[in-house]
Image (cartoon, coloured by chain):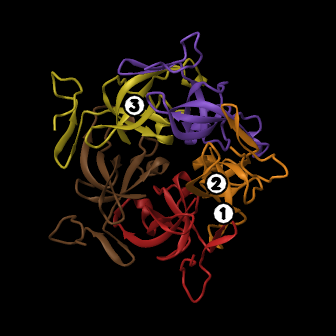
Chain colours: A brown, B yellow, C purple, D red, E orange
Amino acid sequence: MLIGKIVGTLVAEQKDPKLVGTKLLVVRQLDVKARETEGYVIAADTVGAGVGEVILYATGSSARQTLATENKPIDATIMAIVDTWEVYGEVMYTSNCSPCDNQLVVR
Amino acid sequence: MLIGKIVGTLVAEQKDPKLVGTKLLVVRQLDVKARETEGYVIAADTVGAGVGEVILYATGSSARQTLATENKPIDATIMAIVDTWEVYGEVMYTSNCSPCDNQLVVR
Amino acid sequence: MLIGKIVGTLVAEQKDPKLVGTKLLVVRQLDVKARETEGYVIAADTVGAGVGEVILYATGSSARQTLATENKPIDATIMAIVDTWEVYGEVMYTSNCSPCDNQLVVR
Amino acid sequence: MLIGKIVGTLVAEQKDPKLVGTKLLVVRQLDVKARETEGYVIAADTVGAGVGEVILYATGSSARQTLATENKPIDATIMAIVDTWEVYGEVMYTSNCSPCDNQLVVR
Amino acid sequence: MLIGKIVGTLVAEQKDPKLVGTKLLVVRQLDVKARETEGYVIAADTVGAGVGEVILYATGSSARQTLATENKPIDATIMAIVDTWEVYGEVMYTSNCSPCDNQLVVR
């Protein structure tokens, strides 16, 4: 899986019938230090994520292993909202820094 | 999924029997700001898309999860025509800017 | 799918039993303007293609969706011989330019 | 499969129900000489690996072929802890260099 | 499939039970002219290949389509030992150049 940040939404009226009701989000891939990279993907949301949140997404056939995406023409799925991760004991990101909302940790 | 723009068509008479009747389109990958990249893919159309339209395509086994592509040797499928997407509240692309047709938003 | 040009053949006597009888070809990936790129793949032929021909190939599990490749350890399959494709109305390649044989269109 | 080094852990409370109980680790890809590369992946652990250990991970549908990951939206799985590997007879890495713990071989 | 050269072996005692008995080899990807590239993969051997040999490997779900790898968390499998390949009639590699053993053709 890769870590991403939800940066936007996408609307498509004319689509495969199986996609009706699927929320499509624009996701920027983050690197291990929580910085945005050039990579992006349009992913199906299955966990109620919103713009600004840092999430985990799965690709390929693994993206169809949720109740909301099975047997659908979807190759990228958001299946977790990230609370925090650390590298060698140093926190790279945390969502729990109230009153800030989903701000990256100052490094 | 990735966002692409249909830039052309491909004809192949001698092919696997399962591909008879499949419309094959040349798709340029777009970046998140709706600019054409160097990447391309030949994709099966399942939504009646045409040259100039901005679409969403799925790859890998997910490309076979539509009625038109199941069990076929197809690894890229157009499964939605994009109306609009935005990033951090800014519209990156909209197809609904009549009288323009599928023109990118001026940024 | 991607467009490729068959540039050679590969021989392997000691192999998985399922591969007996499979013709293995060396394929150079072409870009959208029909130019050879650095990318290559060894693909199973299922349409009687030969050296010099421009073809379409599928990868991953989709490569196993032909009668000749199902359930085999094959991840790239030639499933169509390309006649022509165009981009924004301009012909990028055509095989039908007799007396030339499979020559690229002069651009 | 690729060789990686576990460099951290990731916590996500809000996630697909199938992911409950799955340990998610931050893995840096190593090159063939055991050097860290820029590549990373968030992988499910199935062998009790910990930070600092050098491991093998599988991606795609193969990542779901363990008892702990089957049918889950997981596209990268740690399925072995590496003891040693060598290239042309030269040891590139060994975990068995007590009293050092998982230190790379000096080259 | 891609062409690779076996350059080493990897040992991992603590692993998924399905991997017991699987020989894991370090494979350098070769380009179409038989030169080693930076790319590598750890692949399961199913054809009795050894260090120095030039082989063909399949990745993804196709890597599980051999008797020795089915249903295992393996995403790269060696399924053929290459004897020779040629590009536009020129031999790029041959294993049959006794008394040399698996040496590349001088070009």
Task: Name the residue type under label 2.
Answer: Asn
Question: Looking at the picture, does residue D70 appear above or below residue B46?
Answer: below
Front one among C87 and A90:
C87
Q: Residues within 10 Å of mark 2 (few under 14, many from 20)?
A: some
**Residue ranking furthest to the right:** E99
Determine contact: label 1, label 2, CB under 8 Å: yes
Picture coordinates of residue A89, whole percent (x, y): 37, 79
Front one among B91 and E88:
E88
Q: Chain of mark 1?
A: E
User: Which numbered disc, 2 or 3, marks the residue closer to the eye?
Assistant: 3
Which residue does the numbered mark 3 point to in the structure image? B27
Question: Are dots 1 and 3 on a single chain?
Answer: no
* Residue C79 picture quarter: top right
Classify residue C93 as left or right of residue D81: left
Q: Chain of mark 3?
A: B
Front one among C28 and C23:
C28
Which residue does the numbered mark 2 point to in the structure image? E71
Q: Chain of mark 2?
A: E
Picture coordinates of residue A62, whole percent (x, y): 47, 51
Which residue does the numbered mark 1 point to in the structure image? E18
